[in-house]
Amino acid sequence: MTSLRAFTCDDLFRFNNINLDPLTETVSFRCRRPRGRRPRGAPQYGIPFYLQYLAHWPEYFIVAEAPGGELMGYIMGKAEGSVAREEWHGHVTALSVAPEFRRLGLAAKLMELLEEISEKKGGFFVDLFVRVSNQVAVNMYKQLGYSVYRTVLEYYSASNGEPDEDAYDESNMKYKGCGQTATVVADFFSLAIDMRKALSRDTEKKSIIPLPHPVRPEDIE
């Protein structure tokens, strides 16, 4: 029987079967960062990064373990934002399931647990970032009740030194909003979409009203 438990330090030496999968963003992922702190595309997921989450948000770090002891998948996240501005929320930093354990509903269960934790903490919503080209993940999150809130430019770096695919148009994308038109040409940095799901505290669903224009990583609080 699959067990869902708190992630431990020992698990850091046992989850390569999950993290080595090409669909898992653990090297080229660009975490939200203060302005000017880290160069584009700098690797972020080292052991100190995981330990930081274990120390600050242990309740948001959950692993699924098979009866034989193999790690099947994990989710890690955090609580952040301003309560006064109704932006206090749960954030999904990473969600991944090993290839051999997919299509068992593990991702949905792990997301459900993170949402329950965020509800208990009084969050207004849960959010996550995903490559716009990863339609499998985008569709999965939509099935779980998430919707696109905004597009983030240059959020992910290229993984193989080759130009990343450009979102909904292979060559360029145009956004219209606030009286301006921005054209995004595919380069070495991939677009991301910020997807959100409102929680019970956000009775009017204001947190998921889509933005009409894209933003950059340094604009994300």
Image: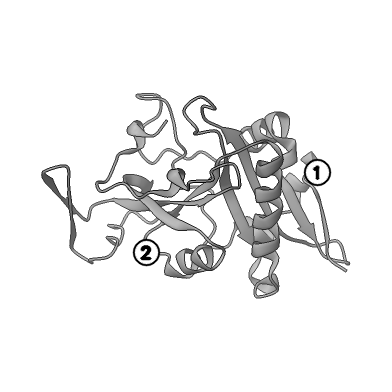
Horizontal side of 143 relative to 116 (left or right) equals left
Residue that appears at 35% across and 37% down: 217
User: Which residue is disc 2 drawn over?
Assistant: 133
Q: What is the quadrant of residue 107 in the picture?
A: bottom right
Q: Amino acid at mark 2?
A: Ser
Q: What is the quadrant of residue 68 in the picture?
A: bottom right
Mark toward the start of the polypeptide (1 vs 2): 1
Image spot of residue 47 (x, y percent): 65, 37
Query: Which residue is the extreme one toward the front?
Result: 204
Q: Amino acid at mark 1?
A: Asp
67 up-or-down from 30: above or below: below
Residue that appears at 47% across and 40% down: 43
Q: Which mark is residue 10?
A: 1
Q: Are marks 1 and 2 in contact (CB under 8 Å)?
A: no
Question: Mark 2 falls on what kind of element?
Answer: loop
**Badge 2: residue crowd in 10 Å (few <14, some 14–19, many ≥20):** some
Question: Mark 1 falls on what kind of element?
Answer: helix
Q: Nearer the viewer, residue 179 or 206?
A: 206
**Badge 1: residue crowd in 10 Å (few <14, some 14–19, many ≥20):** few
Image spot of residue 161 (x, y percent): 33, 53
| Quarter of the C terminus within the rendering | top left
Residue that appears at 30% across and 61% down: 167
Horizontal side of 34 relative to 5 (left or right) equals left
87 up-or-down from 10: above or below: above
Of the two numbered discs 1 and 2 in the rendering, the one whose residue sits closer to the viewer: 2
Horizontal side of 93 relative to 177 (left or right) equals right
Image spot of residue 71 (x, y percent): 76, 59
Q: Between marks 1 and 2, how big is the CA–CA gap?
A: 33 Å
